[in-house]
Image: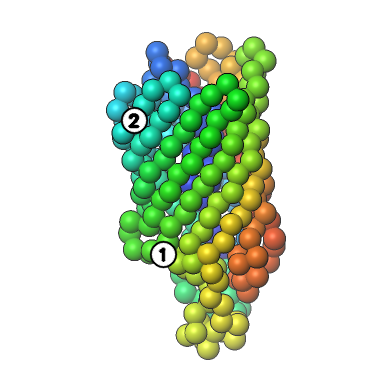
Amino acid sequence: MNRFKISVLALLLPVCGLAQAEQAHPLTLGASVIYAESPYKGGQDRYLPVPIINYEGDSFWLRSLQGGYYLWKDPQNQLSLTLAGWAQQYDPDDNDLGAMKGLDKRRMTLMGGVEYRHLADWGIVRTNLLGDVLDNSDGIVWDLSYLYRFDFGSFSVTPGIGAIWNSSNQNRYYYGVSGHEAARTGISRYQPDDSWSPYVELSANYRLTDRWNAGIYARYTRLADEIKDSPMVNQDSQLTAWTGISYTF
């Protein structure tokens, strides 16, 4: 089985609404499950349990597997330095297809950079620029999106649209096939360039009590040509979802 895991960058940034802490109660704990659709040939979709650990302070914040330090924070603007786990990986030992089993392993990594959010009556602008700090992919990722929140008492819904830019190094590490891999497996050599992948997302949160919240998040990404044309990939889109329950202290 392909041990592809969903990008934490893709999920953990937007889904803090599953357990969004109020300023008066900065700590939120809970449990959740991620559904991750694999893009790789021979890969299988996965269900991953993930703890919800959210903290919102004056200088520091934590959203499950991502954390940051505020450089600028006011009611409308939030600029921070951030570190986020990038949990996508490819393990050939867990793939059932003969040729795919001969490819090199693609490892998880840690991404670091800056994140900015602007909150206004007309919606939310969210963007971040992160680079690999462990020298696994040596890649850079830029995520830019717009969201609008609708409140209905205890229930809220936030649809959004956006796009993710992957640098050529990022695409080549996770989707490229090197010359020595091609010679060893018979899979065609493939060296993609940088790419843009658009997506739509939807998150919903229900306040069960003053402290308990339940939420769900889903994102549909249309994979860029540089990704879907890879001989490692067998689909042109990807669906991810997250659902959980949390308690705010």
Q: Secondary structure at mark 1?
A: loop
Foreground pick, 180 / 128: 128
Residue linked to disc 1: 137
- The kind of residue tagged 1 is Ser
Considering depth in this image, is 186 or 147 the residue closer to the camera? Answer: 147
* Residue 235: x %, y % from top left: 69, 62
**Residue 149 falls in which quadrant of the image?**
top right
Q: Is residue 37 above or below residue 102?
A: above
Q: Residue at x 47, y 85 (%)?
A: 180
Does residue 196 appear to the left or right of 24 in the view shown? right
**What amino acid is labelled 2 in the image?**
Trp
Quarter of the image where the C terminus is located = top left
Q: Tell me the tag on residue 10.
A: none
| Spatial separation of the CA atoms under disc 2 and disc 1 | 30 Å
Of badges 2 and 1, the one in the foreground is 2
Rendered view: 73 above or below 152 = below
Quarter assignment of residue 185: bottom right
Q: Position of residue 219 (x, y in %)?
A: 64, 43
Q: Are marks 2 and 1 in contact (CB under 8 Å)?
A: no
| Residue 95, visible in the rendered structure | yes
Residue 174, visible in the rendered structure: no
Residue in view at x 33 percent, y 24 percent: 57
Kindly identify the residue that appears in the image at 66 percent across and 43 percent down: 200
Please say which color scheme the image uses.
rainbow
Identify the secondary structure beneath mark 2: strand
Residue shown at 50% from the left, 14% from the top: 211
Residue at the spot of label 2: 72
Q: Is residue 74 or residue 22 the one in the foreground?
A: 74
Q: Residue 80's quadrant in the figure?
A: top left
| Mark 1 crowdedness (10 Å alpha carbons): few <14, some 14-19, many ≥20 | many
